[in-house]
Image: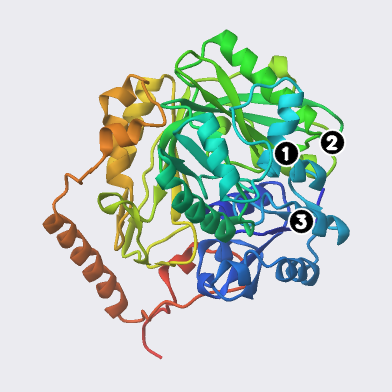
């Protein structure tokens, strides 16, 4: 097993990996940009190293700085989390050359599945159904125009080098194609360092179903069942659940075996997710492989009892996968809601600023994967995800009720978040009936407005601010400062303090 692991990420996913390292008895190293100096993952890790200024290309996307941090701290392996360099084959190769272990797929597999065009070509040759579309990166706009006419509008613009909805656009006419391509290329370049995009036929109103797969270094592959990810806004998942209401046992078996075949064809190792689109006739099409840990992995953990981060680390350390397909099963139902620093009443614009007050939901069957705390300043530079709220219950209906209750107990003041929006999504009749497709948000929540008045929000914010000011005004209390390179302590979330009294 590794003696020390560096986590090349930030926020809630870095906290999640640090906790897994702690459970396995492995010291962890956090990296952080200058603006993330006071972040929770920095406080929780055994060591922390600043790797540059706030912009991601100068810090979290800077391979040299990350390798230097691993070398200087004696880390033997690097966990990339998701986003940033997690699906970058050049980063995996760099670590291999540096004799550092990449806790993810090998660079050749990552090179294949990370290039969506090559992956489509490979899967089609293997007899795996794919969505009609381009099988090579277009050289210019004219190629895209010709392909769009051949496929028929609407078409989907997708980034070749990554997923997560980055660079993705639906185009309904030739007039929209050029500006859509230009916008998609800019977003893909910013997210993955590669502006390549391609076109696929847009399957209208599908369901988005993915399968979690694990593969060790010795050819053993298992799937851990599906996740339904159809609740999306701007092609970004916001609610995930398992099991999917769209699958019966036979379709689940067929899709699971196809997912395993995809990873075997790619000679893939470690954790990965095979994503499919399911049309109205229950035909499924290979979409892509997400070659990393997924944001939504907790719902799989809660229904199978398998810790996916533990499995990632053990596989990377050379251990054989101790799971057998025939022994794996699901119990109950799990739902996850992603909590973003966004204003859902204003086209989901990112919301930065200071968190004046945080009340975390608690209770049986409630899990909160979190990267924030009261008084933390949410930066403007990164993906606005703050936390993930996950619930488990014996049935889907009970899980929905538990999620609604947990969202009602969840309070974040000082910035805009998606909590109220998600509560309304979970409460919607069509969601409760399991009638969800990727068009759900547009169909049912276009122009959504919060049921809480601006006056009530103002009162809550003023109360939280007054409470914060009161704490700071007490004898012995001083303003917070950021701890770095220290072991985590819950006292750190209170800020810098001292015990008052006579000297």
The residue pinned by badge 2 equals 217
Above-or-below relation of 490 to 300? below
Look at the image and tell me in which quarter the C terminus lies.
Answer: bottom left
Q: Which of marks 1 and 3 is nearer the N terminus?
A: 3
* Quarter where residue 112 is shown: top right
Q: Give the secondary structure at mark 2.
A: loop
The residue pinned by badge 3 equals 90
Q: Earlier in the sequence, mark 2 or mark 1?
A: 1
Q: How far, Cα to Cα, is label 3 from label 2?
A: 20 Å
**Depth check: 8 or 124 in front?**
124
Label 3: few (<14), some (14–19) or many (≥20) C-alpha neighbours in 10 Å: some
Please state the horizontal and vertical placement of residue 498, each as a whole percent of the image: 43, 79
Please state the horizontal and vertical placement of residue 371, each as a whole percent of the image: 49, 56
Please state the horizontal and vertical placement of residue 254, each as a whole percent of the image: 64, 14
Q: Give the secondary structure at mark 1.
A: helix
Label disc, if present, on residue 118 of the rendered structure: 1
């Amino acid at each position: 097993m590794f003696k020390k692991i560096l986590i090349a990420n930030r926020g809630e996913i870095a906290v999640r990996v640090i906790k897994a390292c702690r459970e396995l008895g492995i010291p962890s190293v956090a990296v952080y940009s200058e603006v993330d100096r006071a972040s929770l993952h920095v406080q929780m890790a055994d060591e922390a190293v600043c790797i540059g200024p706030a912009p991601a290309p100068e810090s979290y996307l800077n391979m040299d700085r990350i390798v230097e941090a691993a070398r200087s701290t004696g880390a033997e392996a690097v966990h990339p989390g998701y986003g940033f360099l997690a699906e970058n084959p050049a980063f995996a190769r760099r670590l291999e050359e540096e004799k550092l272990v990449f806790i993810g797929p090998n660079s050749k597999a990552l090179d294949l599945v990370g290039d969506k065009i090559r992956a489509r070509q490979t899967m089609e040759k293997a007899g795996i159904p794919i969505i009609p579309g381009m099988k090579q990166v277009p050289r210019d706009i004219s190629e895209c125009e010709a392909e769009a006419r051949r496929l028929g509008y609407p078409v989907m613009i997708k980034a070749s080098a990554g997923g997560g909805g980055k660079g993705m656009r639906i185009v309904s006419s030739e007039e929209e194609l050029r500006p859509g391509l230009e916008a998609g290329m800019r977003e893909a370049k910013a997210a993955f360092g590669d502006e390549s995009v391609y076109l696929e036929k847009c399957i209208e109103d599908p369901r988005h179903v993915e399968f979690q797969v694990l593969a060790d270094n010795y050819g053993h592959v298992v799937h851990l069942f599906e996740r339904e990810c159809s609740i999306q806004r701007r092609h970004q998942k916001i609610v995930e659940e398992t099991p999917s209401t769209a699958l019966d046992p036979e379709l689940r078996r067929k899709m699971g075996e196809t997912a395993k075949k995809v990873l075997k064809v790619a000679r893939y190792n470690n954790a990965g997710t095979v994503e499919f689109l399911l049309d109205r006739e229950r035909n499924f099409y290979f979409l892509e492989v997400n070659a990393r840990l997924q944001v939504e992995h907790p719902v799989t953990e809660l229904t199978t009892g398998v810790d996916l981060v533990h499995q990632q680390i053990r596989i990377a350390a050379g251990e054989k996968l101790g799971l057998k397909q025939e022994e794996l099963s699901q119990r109950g139902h799990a739902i996850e809601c992603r909590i973003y620093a966004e204003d859902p009443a204003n086209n989901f614009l990112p919301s930065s600023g200071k968190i004046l007050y945080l009340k975390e939901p608690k209770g049986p069957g409630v899990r909160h994967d979190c990267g924030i705390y009261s008084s933390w300043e949410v930066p403007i530079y990164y993906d606005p995800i703050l936390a993930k709220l996950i619930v488990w219950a014996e049935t889907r209906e009970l899980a929905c009720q538990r999620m609604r209750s947990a969202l009602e107990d969840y309070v974040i003041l000082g910035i805009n978040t998606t909590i109220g929006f998600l509560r309304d999504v979970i409460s919607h009749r069509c969601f409760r009936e399991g009638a969800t497709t990727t068009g759900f948000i547009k169909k049912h929540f276009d122009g959504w407005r919060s049921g809480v008045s601006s006056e009530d929000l103002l009162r809550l914010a003023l109360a939280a601010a007054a409470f914060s000011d009161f704490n700071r005004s007490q004898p012995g209390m001083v303003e917070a400062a950021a701890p770095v390179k220290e072991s985590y302590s819950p006292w750190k979330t209170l800020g810098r303090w001292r015990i008052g009294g006579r000297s």
